[in-house]
Amino acid sequence: MVELDEAWALNQRVSLRPERFGALAYHFGNRRLSFLRHPDLVEVAESLADLPTVADALRAAGVEEPRWGSFQRALGTLASSDMIVRRDAVPPGKEQVAPPPVAALAEGKPS
Amino acid sequence: MVTDQPRAATRSLADDFKLGLEAPICLTWELTYACNLACRHCLSSSGRRDPAELSTAECYGVIDELQRLGVFYVNLGGGEPMLRRDFFDVVEYSTAHQVGVKFSTNGTYIDAPAARRLASMDYLDIQLSIDGASAAVNDSLRGAGSWAAARTAMDHLAAADFGAFKISVVVTRHNAHQLDEFRSMAADYGAQLRITRLRPSGRGADTWDELHPTQQQQRDLYHWLLDRPDVLTGDSFFHLNALGTEQLPGLNLCGAGRVVCLIDPVGDVYACPFVIHDEFLAGNVRDSGGFTGVWRGSDLFSSLREPTSAGACASCGAYDACQGGCMASKFFVGLELDDPDPECVLGHGEAALAERGLNGSPVPRPGADHSRPGAPVPVSIGTRPG
């Protein structure tokens, strides 16, 4: 299960390719193919690594709260096939940078 | 494999795929028609190298294009792809350009050093072909010594710690009873079993009648696969779905020209690896628009992405499950593309086959025959020299 207050990222071995229905995701490690069937889900998956939490990524993509449950389930499926992975709370490579204020994220302006 | 997604889409994923993708998910790329074997069911009638085969530089150009298109991986094959002197160059160029490689080989040229080199490479997967769990069954189809060569290659890959390579089996009437043995063989090597459907393509056009599984074997196979989701199939058995309410894992659709295609050794682009024939030739990677132009602009591919009619299958309740089966199988046994699959599990194929040719049209012959005229042809099982 992917929790809203957790930090996740797209697996670095996963390649995303936009398609009219969303995107295809291919995992070069386990060679599995997955389908992201909504453009919003693509945006969320791509931004996970740059934002502190799942909730931040959902908010930044403009996903309204009533839809968060279905996005959590979709992210859970992506997690079960290793397409997205848990990470430490601070985004990798950004250890020295303070997390952006949540307010800025809510306005869709991640630093 | 298909993930749950937010909000039920108005179209199914299969419907999306039928309309075609911006680029193939993967494609088969036969690197050469040269082959040291002369398998009786070879889908590309391989044997002799074609003088017009793509040069190394042209191969690199195709890979550059595939990278730009975001094609995730290529299935390199042949012929025997390792017979190309630039085989490792092409593989390394591809993986260095984010186009993963799976390649199909008969294993003859995987000696210990080659196995170590292959094991050291990332984004690489190997499909080793073997069509009998015993030498007798395999060699009757693939030629004397080919079973031993494949097993030796597997030994080398295991010794080199390659990891989970694939053991690739075409299911025939003669090996269908050996599937458990193949699975044990894979387990012994830490490998994965991959089985695919025999098509009447290439030299298979002449051997299909004798080799394709019986109806009972097809029924057994359906249940065997349902019980063993770890066995890979390349989605090639979706016609079996008409046997029950439970679907085999996969997309359950013909991907030809929609999500997959074939590039042959001379750069010709066909709708799928099993339809090497002018009727399914979409263009050539040497054309001015390159592969991209063919994928996006060919009239043939456009027509394959249009909604298909159920044709003769319209009155059958199983059409949604089987999608009418395989285009290539129908074509090379002389059926119309909207006829039932010749191996229809509900028996409609036999009736269609009985009626074929009544309108006087000949059964199409596979194109691009590169068979070696003098090559020894393996002897079929049950054939007793007189």
Image (spheres, coloured by chain):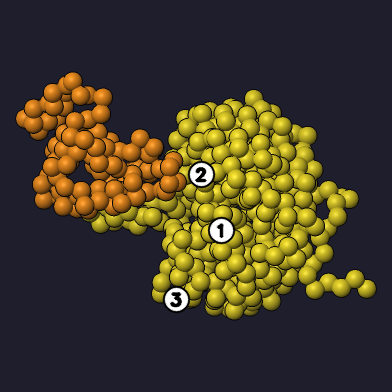
Chain colours: A orange, B yellow
Disc 3: which chain? B
Mark seen at residue B244: 3
Determine whether B209 is above or below B231 in the image: below
Q: Is residue A2 left or right of residue B53?
A: left
Disc 2: which chain? B
Q: Tally the marks.
A: 3
Quarter assignment of residue B93: top right
Task: Determine whether the residue tagged by mark 2 lies in a helix, strand or loop.
Answer: strand
Q: Residue at x 50, y 64 (%)?
A: B238
Q: Earlier in the sequence, mark 3 or mark 1?
A: 1
Query: Extreme right residue here?
Result: B386
Kind of residue sitting beneath label 3: Gly
Q: Residue at x 55, y 44 (%)?
A: B161
Determine whether B11 is above or below A52 in the image: below
Task: Determine whether the residue tagged by mark 1 lies in a helix, strand or loop.
Answer: helix
Q: Position of residue B265 (x, y in %)?
A: 68, 39
The residue where tag 2 is placed is: B26
